[in-house]
Amino acid sequence: MKRVTLAMYMLQPSSATKRSFSISVYVTTIIIACLFSNALRAQTSSASPTPEYQRVIKERVTKIVDVLEITDSKKYNNALETISSQYFALNDIHEKSKEKIAQIKKEAPAEKQSEEIKKEDEIKSGVLKQQHDRFIAQLKKDLSDAQIEKVKNGMTYNVLNVTYTAYQDMIPSLTTEQKDKIYT
Protein backbone atom coordinates (compact mmCIF):
# COMPACT_ATOMS: atom_id res chain seq x y z
CA MET A 1 0.00 0.00 0.00
CA LYS A 2 2.81 2.33 0.81
CA ARG A 3 4.33 1.80 -2.62
CA VAL A 4 1.15 2.83 -4.40
CA THR A 5 0.81 5.92 -2.22
CA LEU A 6 4.43 6.84 -2.80
CA ALA A 7 4.05 6.35 -6.56
CA MET A 8 0.89 8.44 -6.63
CA TYR A 9 2.60 11.14 -4.61
CA MET A 10 5.51 11.19 -7.05
CA LEU A 11 3.14 11.50 -10.03
CA GLN A 12 1.34 14.52 -8.60
CA PRO A 13 2.82 17.76 -9.90
CA SER A 14 4.26 20.19 -7.41
CA SER A 15 2.82 23.68 -7.08
CA ALA A 16 5.81 25.06 -9.01
CA THR A 17 5.13 22.61 -11.84
CA LYS A 18 1.45 23.58 -11.82
CA ARG A 19 2.36 27.27 -12.06
CA SER A 20 4.85 26.61 -14.84
CA PHE A 21 2.28 24.56 -16.74
CA SER A 22 -0.47 27.18 -16.36
CA ILE A 23 1.88 29.95 -17.49
CA SER A 24 2.91 28.00 -20.58
CA VAL A 25 -0.76 27.29 -21.40
CA TYR A 26 -1.53 30.99 -20.95
CA VAL A 27 1.37 32.08 -23.19
CA THR A 28 0.46 29.50 -25.83
CA THR A 29 -3.15 30.69 -25.81
CA ILE A 30 -2.06 34.31 -26.30
CA ILE A 31 0.25 33.37 -29.17
CA ILE A 32 -2.49 31.37 -30.91
CA ALA A 33 -4.96 34.23 -30.42
CA CYS A 34 -2.49 36.71 -31.95
CA LEU A 35 -1.83 34.47 -34.93
CA PHE A 36 -5.55 33.91 -35.44
CA SER A 37 -6.34 37.63 -35.28
CA ASN A 38 -3.58 38.39 -37.81
CA ALA A 39 -4.97 35.73 -40.13
CA LEU A 40 -8.44 37.22 -39.84
CA ARG A 41 -7.11 40.72 -40.49
CA ALA A 42 -5.29 39.48 -43.60
CA GLN A 43 -8.46 37.81 -44.86
CA THR A 44 -10.68 40.81 -44.31
CA SER A 45 -8.25 43.39 -45.69
CA SER A 46 -8.92 42.42 -49.28
CA ALA A 47 -12.45 41.13 -48.66
CA SER A 48 -13.90 44.32 -47.19
CA PRO A 49 -13.07 47.55 -48.99
CA THR A 50 -12.85 50.75 -47.00
CA PRO A 51 -15.92 53.00 -46.79
CA GLU A 52 -14.01 55.65 -48.79
CA TYR A 53 -13.29 53.16 -51.59
CA GLN A 54 -16.94 52.06 -51.58
CA ARG A 55 -18.09 55.69 -51.84
CA VAL A 56 -15.75 56.41 -54.76
CA ILE A 57 -16.87 53.28 -56.60
CA LYS A 58 -20.54 54.08 -56.01
CA GLU A 59 -20.07 57.59 -57.46
CA ARG A 60 -18.09 56.28 -60.43
CA VAL A 61 -20.61 53.54 -61.19
CA THR A 62 -23.55 55.93 -60.89
CA LYS A 63 -21.94 58.22 -63.49
CA ILE A 64 -21.44 55.25 -65.83
CA VAL A 65 -24.98 53.91 -65.44
CA ASP A 66 -26.62 57.35 -65.74
CA VAL A 67 -25.16 57.68 -69.26
CA LEU A 68 -26.95 54.47 -70.31
CA GLU A 69 -30.39 56.12 -70.05
CA ILE A 70 -32.03 53.06 -68.49
CA THR A 71 -35.71 53.67 -67.73
CA ASP A 72 -36.48 50.36 -65.99
CA SER A 73 -35.52 50.76 -62.31
CA LYS A 74 -34.83 47.03 -61.88
CA LYS A 75 -32.39 47.03 -64.82
CA TYR A 76 -30.83 50.26 -63.54
CA ASN A 77 -30.24 48.78 -60.08
CA ASN A 78 -28.97 45.50 -61.58
CA ALA A 79 -26.49 47.45 -63.70
CA LEU A 80 -25.33 49.41 -60.64
CA GLU A 81 -24.84 46.21 -58.66
CA THR A 82 -23.11 44.32 -61.49
CA ILE A 83 -20.64 47.10 -62.26
CA SER A 84 -19.92 47.79 -58.58
CA SER A 85 -19.31 44.09 -58.00
CA GLN A 86 -16.92 44.07 -60.94
CA TYR A 87 -14.85 46.90 -59.47
CA PHE A 88 -14.67 45.14 -56.10
CA ALA A 89 -13.80 41.80 -57.73
CA LEU A 90 -11.05 43.37 -59.84
CA ASN A 91 -9.62 45.12 -56.79
CA ASP A 92 -9.68 41.85 -54.86
CA ILE A 93 -7.91 39.96 -57.67
CA HIS A 94 -5.18 42.61 -57.93
CA GLU A 95 -4.70 42.86 -54.16
CA LYS A 96 -4.41 39.09 -53.75
CA SER A 97 -1.88 38.97 -56.58
CA LYS A 98 0.16 41.78 -54.99
CA GLU A 99 0.17 39.86 -51.70
CA LYS A 100 1.25 36.68 -53.48
CA ILE A 101 4.09 38.49 -55.30
CA ALA A 102 5.24 40.07 -52.03
CA GLN A 103 5.25 36.60 -50.47
CA ILE A 104 7.26 35.24 -53.41
CA LYS A 105 9.81 38.05 -53.08
CA LYS A 106 10.08 37.36 -49.37
CA GLU A 107 10.22 33.55 -49.40
CA ALA A 108 11.40 32.30 -52.79
CA PRO A 109 15.10 31.97 -53.59
CA ALA A 110 16.38 34.83 -55.76
CA GLU A 111 16.93 32.59 -58.79
CA LYS A 112 13.30 31.36 -58.67
CA GLN A 113 11.57 34.69 -58.03
CA SER A 114 11.29 35.80 -61.65
CA GLU A 115 9.79 32.47 -62.69
CA GLU A 116 7.37 32.39 -59.74
CA ILE A 117 6.26 35.99 -60.36
CA LYS A 118 5.67 35.19 -64.03
CA LYS A 119 3.51 32.21 -63.00
CA GLU A 120 1.53 34.42 -60.64
CA ASP A 121 1.00 36.99 -63.41
CA GLU A 122 -0.28 34.24 -65.71
CA ILE A 123 -2.64 32.99 -63.02
CA LYS A 124 -3.88 36.53 -62.42
CA SER A 125 -4.45 37.05 -66.16
CA GLY A 126 -6.52 33.87 -66.30
CA VAL A 127 -8.59 34.87 -63.29
CA LEU A 128 -9.13 38.36 -64.75
CA LYS A 129 -10.27 36.84 -68.07
CA GLN A 130 -12.77 34.60 -66.27
CA GLN A 131 -14.03 37.54 -64.23
CA HIS A 132 -14.39 39.67 -67.38
CA ASP A 133 -16.36 36.95 -69.15
CA ARG A 134 -18.73 36.56 -66.17
CA PHE A 135 -19.12 40.33 -66.00
CA ILE A 136 -20.06 40.69 -69.67
CA ALA A 137 -22.47 37.74 -69.42
CA GLN A 138 -24.12 39.38 -66.40
CA LEU A 139 -24.41 42.74 -68.19
CA LYS A 140 -26.00 41.07 -71.23
CA LYS A 141 -28.96 40.05 -69.07
CA ASP A 142 -30.06 43.68 -68.72
CA LEU A 143 -28.18 45.80 -71.28
CA SER A 144 -27.89 46.07 -75.05
CA ASP A 145 -24.56 45.68 -76.83
CA ALA A 146 -24.36 49.46 -77.30
CA GLN A 147 -24.94 50.01 -73.58
CA ILE A 148 -22.28 47.42 -72.73
CA GLU A 149 -19.81 49.33 -74.91
CA LYS A 150 -20.66 52.49 -72.97
CA VAL A 151 -20.03 50.62 -69.71
CA LYS A 152 -16.64 49.43 -70.98
CA ASN A 153 -15.75 52.95 -72.11
CA GLY A 154 -16.84 54.40 -68.78
CA MET A 155 -14.86 51.87 -66.77
CA THR A 156 -11.70 52.36 -68.84
CA TYR A 157 -12.07 56.14 -69.15
CA ASN A 158 -12.66 55.74 -72.90
CA VAL A 159 -9.10 54.46 -73.49
CA LEU A 160 -10.22 52.00 -76.17
CA ASN A 161 -11.85 54.65 -78.34
CA VAL A 162 -8.99 57.10 -77.88
CA THR A 163 -6.41 54.44 -78.79
CA TYR A 164 -8.47 53.16 -81.72
CA THR A 165 -8.91 56.67 -83.11
CA ALA A 166 -5.19 57.39 -82.65
CA TYR A 167 -4.24 54.26 -84.62
CA GLN A 168 -6.60 55.27 -87.43
CA ASP A 169 -5.10 58.77 -87.51
CA MET A 170 -1.51 57.48 -87.49
CA ILE A 171 -2.09 54.75 -90.08
CA PRO A 172 -4.92 55.80 -92.41
CA SER A 173 -4.25 52.80 -94.69
CA LEU A 174 -5.48 50.22 -92.13
CA THR A 175 -7.68 47.54 -93.62
CA THR A 176 -11.03 46.61 -92.12
CA GLU A 177 -9.47 43.39 -90.81
CA GLN A 178 -6.67 45.32 -89.11
CA LYS A 179 -9.14 47.79 -87.62
CA ASP A 180 -11.23 44.92 -86.27
CA LYS A 181 -8.11 43.35 -84.75
CA ILE A 182 -7.18 46.61 -83.01
CA TYR A 183 -10.74 47.11 -81.73
CA THR A 184 -11.01 43.64 -80.21
Image (cartoon, helix red, strand yellow):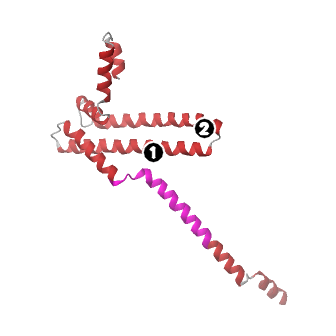
Question: Do residues under tags 1 and 2 come within 8 Å of each other at their CB atoms?
Answer: no
* Residue tagged 1: 95
- Quadrant for residue 180, please give it: top left
Label 1 vs 2, first from the N-terminus: 1
Q: Amino acid at mark 2?
A: Gln
Q: Position of residue 89 (x, y in %)?
A: 39, 43
Circle number at residue 113: 2
| Position of the C terminus by quadrant | top left
In the displayed orientation, state which residue is furthest to the left: 71
- The number of discs equals 2
Q: Position of residue 8 (x, y in %)?
A: 77, 84
- At a point 33% along the width and 22% down the height, the residue shown is 183
Horizontal side of residue 72 vs 47, given as left or right: left
Q: Amino acid at mark 1?
A: Glu
- At a point 23% along the width and 41% down the height, the residue shown is 63
Circle number at residue 29: none
Task: State the residue in front, 25 or 115.
Answer: 115
In the displayed orientation, state which residue is furthest to the top: 173
Horizontal side of residue 93 vs 75, given as left or right: right
Q: Which stretch is magenta?
A: 26-51
Element carrying mark 1: helix
